[in-house]
Amino acid sequence: MIGIFDSGIGGLTVVNALRQRLPDCDLLYFGDTACGPYGDKSAATVLQNTVNKIENLLACGAGIIVIACHTSSSVAWDIIRSRFDVPVFEVITPAVEFALQISRYGRIGVIGTRTTIASGVYAKRIGELNPAAKVHAIACPLLVSLAQEGWLRSPITSMIVKKYLYPLKVKQIDTLILGCNYFPLFKRTIQAKIGSRVQLVDPAVTLVDPLARYLQENTAGSSRLANRKSLRLMVSDITEQVEKSAQLILKQKISLEHMPKRIKTENY
Ligand code: DGL
């Protein structure tokens, strides 16, 4: 079973991408709706919540972990990778590799939450792979609230997207990484505002390649996936709005379960 972790329900865009390319996999989704959104929280708080919830996900039987949250991936990946003895996939590295592959002039824009952008993770990884590339990163926190509100195509959303993207337009970026799992929901508006010559990178999509490769190469790994084509959705707090937003992203009727409570949590 593949365990997918997110700070809330934006990670369902990753579930959509996984179901499209790997329809046979058995998925268990964990959204930390009680503590999220993480995007404006300190790195220490994000790390603590992420590690504790991933321990919980493993206790529920996940054999592979996908960190669908960019904010968690940006501050917690190194610790999670070294701490847990299961394959861990995150959204940042495949997106960076793909962006560098397709970028014509090495002028790459990144948009994400405040904590993701403040971590500097995208600039760091891009710089490691191509020191000549120029990275321009902008935090777009309001887009998280707009997505949660379901305002995907409203004129207000277009105005806000335009304002956020203006500095990236001025820098003449040629590639833009959508560095928050809600942002693919605004793809059309983002493309219209940044211009058709800028190539968008959707990390939910680029994540699937390394995961599919891993599953193909590791029969032991895939046997742990159970192949029941099931999707269980667990969150740490169930509200009507969370349910509505989840349905909007998955485009189907869903039923949410409460994440099991852990008796013991550790400090990191
Ligand atoms: N999951 C977060 C991310 O992808 C977005 C929502 C939040 O702020 O927690 O960065």
Image: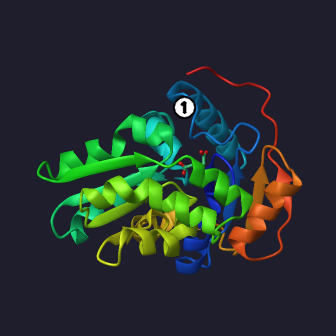
Which residue is more in the foreground, 7 or 221? 7
Q: Residue at x 62, y 50 (%)?
A: 6
Give the farthest residue toward the top.
Answer: 267
Q: Quadrant of residue 42?
A: top right
Q: Position of residue 167 (x, y in %)?
A: 33, 53
Q: Position of residue 211 (x, y in %)?
A: 45, 65
Label 1 crowd bin: few (<14), some (14–19), many (20+), radius 10 Å: many
Which residue is more in the foreground, 106 or 91? 106
Give the farthest residue toward the left.
Answer: 132
Secondary element at image label 1: helix
Q: Position of residue 97 (x, y in %)?
A: 28, 61
Which residue is more in the foreground, 135 or 54? 135
- 41 lies above or below 103: above
Q: Residue at x 68, y 65 (%)?
A: 151
Q: Which residue is mark 1?
A: 47
Give the side of residue 197 with respect to residue 223, left or right. left
Q: Can you say which quadrant of the picture contains the N terminus?
A: bottom right
Give the side of residue 117 with respect to residue 143, left or right. left
Q: Quadrant of residue 98?
A: bottom left
- 79 lies above or below 92: above
Q: Position of residue 255 (x, y in %)?
A: 86, 64
Q: Residue at x 58, y 59 (%)?
A: 182
Q: Mark 1 is on which residue type?
A: Leu
Which residue is more in the foreground, 5 or 190? 190
Q: Judge: label 1 CB < 8 Å from ligand 1.
A: no
Q: Residue at x 39, y 65 (%)?
A: 210
Q: Can you say which quadrant of the picture contains the C terminus?
A: top right
The answer to whether residue 96 is seen in the rendering is no
Give the side of residue 79 with respect to residue 199, left or right. right
The answer to whether residue 20 is seen in the rendering is yes
